[in-house]
Image (tube, grey):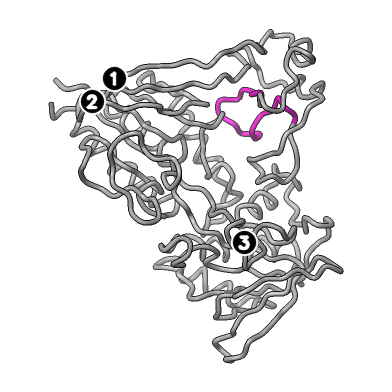
Amino acid sequence: MGNKSVLVVGGGMSGISAAVEAAEAGCEVYLVEKNSYLGGRVAQINQYFPKMCPPNCGLEINFQRIKKNPNIHFFTLAEVEKISGQEGNFDVTIKLKPRYVNENCTGCGKCTEVCPAERDDEFNCGIGKTKAIYLAHPFAFPMKYVIDAAACQGDSCGKCVEACEYKAIDLNMEPQTVNINVGAIIWATGWKPYDITKLSNYGGGRFKNVITNLSLERMAALTGPTEGKILRPSDGKEPQNIAFVQCAGSRDENHLKTCSSVCCMATLKQVNYVREQYPDANITIYFMDIRAMGKHEDYYQKVLEEQNVKLIKGKPSEIKENPENNNLLVLAENQFTQEVETLEYDLVVLATGMEPATASDKVPAELNYDVDGFVIDGPPTPGIYAAGCTRKPGDVATSVQDATAAVLKAIQSTVRR
């Protein structure tokens, strides 16, 4: 018999799906996630298209599957440092960062009430702050607080330690190393929004009222930093004239060459977010072409029928800021009218491309990558398989299917030797 154990790296929807599928097929599974919680980017999304339902129900089902399966061992705040060996016999070193909160944590939140230090809230795309000891989001799994060591005042403060009646806080926790041996590895570290500071023609992140589509997701979420209200970051006002700019950093020789596949549908979904809150708002979509494939075509047509929704075929060449009111001036050639137009908006939402995490954080083994950093299937290391948005851009359903395919390959690797 071969080594029927599988390492899954990445705790987003692809990684979770791969872990539970492999475990339910009889494999011993080790799931590694660098964040303090499982769920990945899906946990940040407000609603799925086209049904417009929240993702938490689907995540919770998978969390229950993880809890009930003794074959799954998961590590958060963890990263793979080293991989050696070959298919059927990989030695893996995992580095665990200290959480500074132990298993006694009940999630009561009394620690945050007394914590004097703050940090930027990266889960909410930097909109707002959290305390140095925090819960990443209300549905975090595991439901345990974590301390940001860079923000914490340490032993010189210690107020959270005093406030915790369960003795769950240990400011002396140290990093740990775990060594495992597995038969196959599934790499599912997912994606990140393309860095808008690289888009100098769109303000390069300098303009407060130019935000990403992921930031809008967090604004629209009831558990988000604005409690579900879409507002202008510069002054907190309700926007009434909003532009969506497609392919911001994607399908571009100077940035990401690939199409991210989901941005068009994400924007159409977000048009509905805006319309629900601001029925009379004017909405403009700048696009090269709308990619709403198959069953999504009907969704696209419904958005076209909305009042005060305008489509401009043309990719903006520049966005400037009006310093008097922080409005945005968008310059683009309208290919429908063949005129160059400069239009003013309260808020501009960039549909940023999906950049794979492997563009910057490579797998510590010999693998092939395309020009954008996506892992290419095949040699040179059999037994290591990419899944989900590590391999190609895609929506949640596609990523889950891709994870299942990776599991089938991984199982073959575990029994081959």
**Residue at mark 2:** 85
Whichever of labels 3 and 2 marks the residue nearer the N terminus, that label is 2
Identify the amino acid type marked 2.
Answer: Gly
- Circles 1 and 2: CB distance less than 8 Å? yes
Residue 129 drawn above or below residue 255: above
* Residue 204 as seen in the image, left or right of residue 346: left
The label on residue 55 is none
First to last magenta residue range = 131-147
Q: Main secondary structure of the magenta part?
A: loop
Identify the amino acid type marked 1.
Answer: Asn
Could you tell me which quadrant the C terminus lies in? top left
Query: What kind of element bears circle 1?
Result: strand
**Residue at mark 1:** 181
Residue mark closest to the camera, 1 vs 3: 1
Residue mark closest to the camera, 3 vs 2: 2
**Residue at mark 3:** 270
Residue 47 drawn above or below residue 270: above
- Where residue 84 appears, x then y in whole percent? 27, 26
Residue placed at 56% from the left, 25% from the top? Answer: 142
Residue placed at 66% from the left, 78% from the top? Answer: 331
Tell me which corner region of the image, top left, top right, bottom left or bottom right, holds residue 238.
bottom right
- Where residue 88 appears, x then y in whole percent? 20, 26
